[in-house]
Amino acid sequence: MSSLRQTATPYLLFFTLSAAGLLAQNTTPTPPPVLDVHVHAMDESFPGMSATCPNQSKFLASDPATKESSNGWSTEECTPKLTPAAKGEYIKDVVAEMERLNVTAVVFGDPASVQKWRDAAPNRVIPGTSFDNGMAPGARVPLDELRKDFTPAPNGGGFKVMGEIGLQYEGLSPSDPSVDQYFALAEELDIPVAIHMGTGGSGRANIAMPKFRGSMGNPLLLEELLARHPKLRVQVMHAGYPMIDNMLTLLQANSHVYVDVAGLIWSYPLKEVNRYIQRLVEAGFEDRVMFGTDQFQWPKLMSYSISLIQNADYLTPDQKRDILYNNAARFLRLPPSPTN
Ligand SMILES: [Zn+2]
């Protein structure tokens, strides 16, 4: 009797664990993969917006005679609020979300900041860095240093995407000759470039960043750059919002230009966001729209932004999968998803 119990117990334990495993698989299957092409390598929660409303319904006027808000965001009551992580928990919380949602992300930042993310999620981070050297406008990373960053490991840093290139915040066009050497390097090394075009947030020029120029987000400013570097692969970050006509003109003229919907997807009125994405897709560019978040503060932003694509009634299931994964996989030259 006792020997039977001794043999039976492990068997029962094994059976119970297997059944529990099957049950867990049945209730929480791994979701299909998502590529987020626009994440920032923040560590601590970014200062400024402690709890922000996604898809605010309006951007309010401010008066130069009174003290203006430092970030230009309204504080309307809303549900949901995007709540920041607890101090020191940000990377851990976002990586947990990436695991839960099966997200792989292009993470942009200076090499040391991106390394923290590579260490935290080695299989889920595609590293990106750019030629901005800190926040001071015009400060650049030396060309040789950048070449090393983009040289495959172990001889170099193994970075895969050049971005986020934020020339618009300096009031510069992406075709400005002063930065052409960096785009020439990207073309030579066959590294895709990701350029901020369009969005800036409310009151960007008069409240937070006096050099910011809305006009420098015009997607057609990329034409000279593309003419000089015909093999360059370009990701127009934020899809040139709100300049839809010029964005469509550029996509029509240059068939290797892609857009991402990062930032745009959660920081403008919801109807407007959907109208913009719908216009891109219905104009025939469904294979060039890539999902992105512009993740920099709130761990739940990823699931919130994915749900906007998943709930879009103007997209077919195939178009949703293309936006959430396939288009970026093609742009980044990753293998296609086995579940697509
Ligand atoms: Zn941006």
Image (tube, helix red, strand yellow):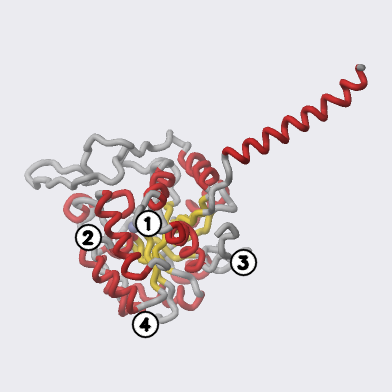
| Three-letter code for the amino acid on which mark 3 is drawn | Asn
**How far is disc 2 from disc 4 in space, using C-alphas?**
26 Å
**Mark 4 or mark 1, earlier in chain:** 1
Query: Circle 1 sits on which residue?
Result: 134
Identify the amino acid type marked 1: Gly
Q: Which residue is mark 3?
A: 155
Q: Amino acid at mark 4?
A: Arg
Q: Residue at x 37, y 43 (%)?
A: 46
Which one is earlier in the sequence, the residue at label 4 or at label 3? 3
**How far is disc 1 from disc 2 in space, using C-alphas?**
16 Å
Task: Identify residue for label 2.
Answer: 211
In the foreground, 57 or 50: 57
Q: Are marks 1 and 3 in contact (CB under 8 Å)?
A: no
* Mark 2 or mark 4: whose residue is earlier in sequence: 2
Q: Secondary structure at mark 4?
A: helix
- Per the image, the residue denoted by label 4 is 228
Mark 1 packing: few (<14 Cα in 10 Å), some, or many (20+)? few
